[in-house]
Amino acid sequence: MRDIGIGAFATSTERACMEGLSIMAKIRLPADPGRFKIAKASAGNYMVRNDRTGKNEVIIPCRDRDQAEDICKRLNEGAHSGEIWV
């Protein structure tokens, strides 16, 4: 029987974590997302959200304030093609 390695039955996410890769989420933005701003969630974590409500509302949770500032800057400058990786 041949050795198939430790990650043979791991999911793609588990294999990526074992290899030291970070998992990124792709967020789709509405056609007219509006302006984005940094807000603080109830637990004290930062998030980036737009000024829309309903189906056009976008909320992106962030690890820290630096990540929130980076994402907010990219979104407000329009440096995206309708999607953003975080």
Image (cartoon, grey):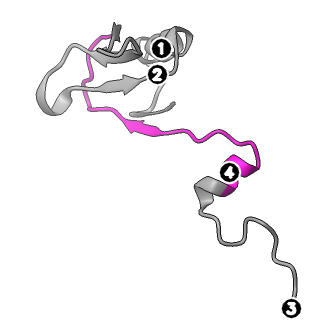
Q: Secondary structure at mark 2?
A: loop
Judge the density around disc 4: few (<14), some (14-19), many (≥20) Cα neighbours within 10 Å.
Answer: some
- Residue 11, image quadrant: bottom right
Q: Secondary structure at mark 4?
A: helix
Q: Which residues fall within the magenta stretch?
A: 15-37
Judge the density around disc 3: few (<14), some (14-19), many (≥20) Cα neighbours within 10 Å.
Answer: few
Q: Which residue is mark 4?
A: 16
N-terminal of the two: label 4 or label 2?
A: 4
Which three-letter amino acid code belongs to the residue tagged 1?
Ala
Residue 15 x %, y %: 68, 57
Label of residue 55 in the image: none
On screen, residue 6 versus residue 13, left or right, reads: right
Q: Are marks 3 and 4 in contact (CB under 8 Å)?
A: no
Q: Which residue is mark 2?
A: 62
Q: Are marks 3 and 2 in contact (CB under 8 Å)?
A: no
Q: Secondary structure at mark 3?
A: loop
**Disc 3 versus disc 2: distance between alpha carbons?**
45 Å
**Disc 4 versus disc 2: distance between alpha carbons?**
20 Å
- Residue 24, image quadrant: top right
Residue at 41% from the left image edge and 15% from the top image edge: 45
Task: Identify which residue, 8 or 60, lies in the foreground.
Answer: 8
Q: Is residue 60 above or below residue 68?
A: below
Residue 39 x %, y %: 33, 9
Please state which of the two labelled residues, at mark 3 or mark 1, is closer to the viewer.
3
On screen, residue 76 versus residue 24, left or right, reads: left
Q: Which residue is mark 3?
A: 1
Judge the density around disc 2: few (<14), some (14-19), many (≥20) Cα neighbours within 10 Å.
Answer: some
Task: Identify which residue, 51 or 62, lies in the foreground.
Answer: 62
Residue 69 x %, y %: 49, 9
